[in-house]
């Protein structure tokens, strides 16, 4: 089946920006990567990335990289929250219908980014963007971007911290039945018995959830919210029974 190549602008040569650019290029997208900080540009270039340094406060420079013209999507992934907000405002003024994905360092910034016109904001309170890019298989990153960025499904990824008294304490990952009950996919678990790395659900060994573990799940935001609500309610019931 023919797949239309998209013109993607990645603004920011931080680790997340470089990883997003690499994943999209591997998928065959046409990626233009830019930044306005010379040191970051030079560092990215030493790692093999073709990065152009531009003045991000200049609307004409933004137009030259495709904003308001042939760009199909923009990633605003600068290190500074204020810079991302300003970029989103500028880009939205030039391109009212352009999908814009950004990342916020604190909750107030996430609100500001949406108010500025961002289409999707990576929320570090739901999942650390850096952990996702460190832990996840490349194919899964690409699949997640395919769904969230290009609009098929609004997916989110969440970390569920397992408490000692939790309803899911002592259960095996494959016994949770989250797919049937919540339309959620269990990505894996950070099992403290084996260190701090994510163990994927596809691992042949069955993993039991214990206090201190982190369950990582992916799915629609409303399903994640419902699961967390039901989990909190079940945990509260267990607390009341043990008193």
Image (cartoon, rainbow, N blue to C red):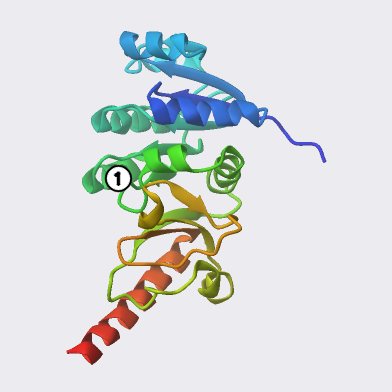
Task: Say which residue appears at 37% left-offset and 70% top-offset.
Answer: 228
Residue count near mark 1 (Cα–Cα under 10 Å), binned few <14, some 14–19, many ≥20: many
Residue 238: name its quadrant: bottom left
Is 218 rendered above or below residue 32? below
Residue 33 makes an appearance in the image: yes
Is 36 rendered above or below residue 12? above
Q: Nearer the viewer, residue 185 or 63?
A: 185
Residue 177 makes an appearance in the image: no
Residue 38 screen position, x and y as percent: 33, 8
Is 13 rendered above or below residue 238? above
**Residue that mark 1 sits on:** 110
Residue 16: name its quadrant: top left
Task: Say which residue appears at 39% left-offset and 44% top-offset.
Answer: 122
Residue 17 screen position, x and y as percent: 43, 27
Residue 179 screen position, x and y as percent: 57, 69
Element type at marker 1? helix
Residue 236 screen position, x and y as percent: 26, 82
> Which residue reaches farthest right?
1
Task: Say which residue appears at 59% left-offset and 40% top-offset.
Answer: 142
Residue 83: name its quadrant: top left
The C terminus: image quadrant:
bottom left
Task: Say which residue appears at 25% left-offset and 42% top-offset.
Answer: 109
Figure disc tally = 1
Residue 39 placement, left or right of 9: left
Q: Nearer the viewer, residue 64 or 219?
A: 219
Q: Nearer the viewer, residue 28 or 180?
A: 180
Residue 123 placement, left or right of 236: right
The N terminus: image quadrant:
top right
């Amino acid at each position: 089946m023919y797949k239309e190549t998209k013109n993607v602008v990645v603004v920011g040569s931080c680790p997340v920006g470089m990883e997003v650019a690499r994943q999209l290029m591997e998928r065959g997208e046409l990626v233009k990567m830019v930044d306005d900080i010379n040191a970051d540009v030079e560092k990215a270039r030493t790692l093999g990335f073709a990065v152009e340094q531009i003045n991000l406060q200049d609307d004409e420079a933004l137009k030259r990289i495709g904003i308001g013209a042939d760009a199909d999507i923009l990633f605003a992934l600068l290190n500074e929250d204020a810079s991302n907000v300003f970029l989103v405002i500028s880009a939205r003024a030039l391109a009212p219908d352009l999908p814009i994905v950004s990342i916020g360092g604190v909750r107030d910034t996430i609100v500001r980014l949406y108010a500025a016109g961002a289409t999707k904001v990576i929320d570090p309170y739901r999942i650390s963007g850096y952990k996702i890019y460190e832990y996840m298989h490349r194919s899964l990153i690409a699949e997640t971007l395919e769904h969230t960025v290009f609009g098929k499904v609004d997916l989110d990824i969440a970390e569920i911290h397992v408490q000692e008294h939790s309803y899911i304490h002592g259960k095996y990952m494959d016994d949770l039945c989250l797919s049937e009950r919540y339309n959620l996919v269990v990505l894996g678990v950070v099992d403290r018995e084996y260190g701090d790395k994510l163990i994927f659900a596809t691992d042949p060994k069955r993993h039991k959830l214990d206090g201190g573990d982190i369950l990582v799940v992916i799915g629609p935001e409303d399903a994640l919210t419902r699961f967390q609500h039901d989990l909190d309610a079940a945990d509260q019931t267990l607390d009341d029974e043990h008193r």
